[in-house]
Image (spheres, rainbow, N blue to C red):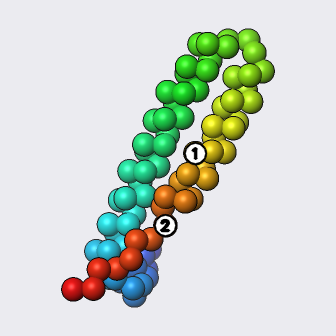
């Protein structure tokens, strides 16, 4: 399986190093957005412990962060050196 992944990533434009750099960038972005979700959902739970506002707020926050990930995680142009 490892060799299949390496060969597919090597065939793609930019080569293996570029593809791995993009994967690391997306992973960092996902971890940052997950941290934002945890902090904001904790604040909502503490501010509104038994309210539907917290439930709706967390669903809206999750949707907004998913859209942010899709917008921000696009491939960057390959540097032509």
Corner quadrant of residue 48: top right
Task: Say which of 26 and 72 sits in front.
Answer: 72
Q: Is residue 61 left or right of residue 74?
A: right
Task: Say which of 15 and 29 sits in front.
Answer: 29
Q: Which mark is residue 15?
A: none
Image coords of residue 10 (percent x, y)? 36, 83
Image coords of residue 55 (percent x, y)? 73, 26
Check the picture and name the quadrant holding the C terminus.
bottom left
Q: Secondary structure at mark 2?
A: loop
Check the picture and name the quadrant holding the N terminus.
bottom left
Q: Is residue 59 left or right of residue 67?
A: right
Residue visible at 75% across and 15% down in the picture: 51
Residue visible at 73% across and 12% down in the picture: 50
Q: Is residue 72 left or right of residue 50?
A: left
Q: Is residue 70 left or right of residue 54?
A: left
Corner quadrant of residue 80: bottom left
Q: Which residue is mark 2?
A: 74
Residue visible at 39% across and 85% down in the picture: 13
How far separated are the C-alphas under marks 1 and 2?
15 Å
Q: Which mark is residue 65?
A: 1
Image coords of residue 5 (percent x, y)? 42, 76
Corner quadrant of residue 65: top right
Residue 28 shows up from this direction: yes
Residue 16 shows up from this direction: no
12, above or below 48, in the image: below
Q: Secondary structure at mark 1?
A: helix
């Amino acid at each position: 399986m490892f060799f299949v992944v390496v060969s597919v990533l090597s065939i793609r434009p930019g080569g293996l190093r570029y593809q791995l750099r993009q994967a690391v960038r997306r992973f960092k972005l996902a971890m940052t957005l997950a941290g934002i979700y945890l902090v904001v959902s904790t604040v909502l739970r503490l501010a509104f412990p038994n309210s539907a506002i917290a439930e709706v707020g967390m669903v809206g926050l999750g949707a907004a962060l998913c859209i942010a990930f899709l917008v921000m995680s696009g491939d960057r142009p390959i540097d032509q050196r």
